[in-house]
Amino acid sequence: MAKLSTEVQVAIKKTMPTCIATASKDGVPNVVYITYLKALDDETILIADNKFDKTRKNLDDNPVLSFTVLDPDTKKSYQIKGKMECATEGQKYTDAVEWVHTNHPQLTPKAAFYMNVEEVYCGAERLA
């Protein structure tokens, strides 16, 4: 598993909204903006599924995701890739609901997706 450097984690915190990309089992791409994405630690990303449609179907069929972030201060862009795990009940799901409710109590996520970070890039350079 790859690790997110402090620099990449800072860029994740500064980027909102974030573009995430998925693909169907047939390889049809889908890119959407989301606001609920955060690094839990240097190996794990949490994404709340508040309104996913095609994205959810894609992740159910093909549980890989990529996203990009841009640090507005350093102007460095990073791409993070990894496999996703879905939680719709239990502590992982509850943690995501509580996180979303801190800013938007009217939203209840349909699911929580956890990424195990596998690759990190800055431009063409693989960082991890």
Image (tube, rainbow, N blue to C red):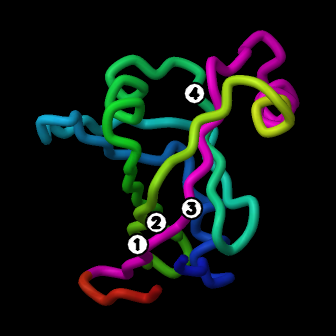
Q: Position of residue 14 (x, y in %)?
A: 62, 60
Q: Position of residue 87 (x, y in %)?
A: 66, 33
Q: Position of residue 105 (x, y in %)?
A: 83, 16
Res 25 seen here? yes
- The amino acid type, in three-letter code, at marker 3 is Asn
Disc number for residue 77: 1
Callout 1: helix, strand or loop? strand
Which residue is rendered at x = 73% and y = 15% of the image?
108
- What is the C-alpha distance between the residues marked 3 and 1? 20 Å
Q: Is residue 105 magenta?
A: yes
Tell which tag, 1 or 4, sits nearer the viewer.
4
Q: Are marks 1 and 4 in contact (CB under 8 Å)?
A: no
In which quadrant is the N terminus drawn?
A: bottom right
Q: Give the residue pinned by disc 2.
A: 70
Q: Give the residue pinned by disc 4.
A: 49
Disc number for residue 32: none
- The amino acid type, in three-letter code, at marker 4 is Asp
Q: Is residue 112 above or below residue 3?
A: above
- The amino acid type, in three-letter code, at marker 1 is Ser
- What is the C-alpha distance between the residues marked 2 and 4? 22 Å
Callout 2: helix, strand or loop? strand
Q: Give the residue pinned by disc 3.
A: 116
- What is the C-alpha distance between the residues marked 2 and 3? 20 Å
Res 103 seen here? no
* Residue interval drawn in magenta: 95-123
Which residue is rendered at x = 59% and y = 62% of the image?
12
Question: Few, some or many C-alpha atoms within 10 Å of disc 3 (few <14, some 14-19, many ≥20)?
Answer: many
- The amino acid type, in three-letter code, at marker 2 is Leu
Question: Few, some or many C-alpha atoms within 10 Å of disc 2 (few <14, some 14-19, many ≥20)?
Answer: many
Front residue of 35/49: it is 49
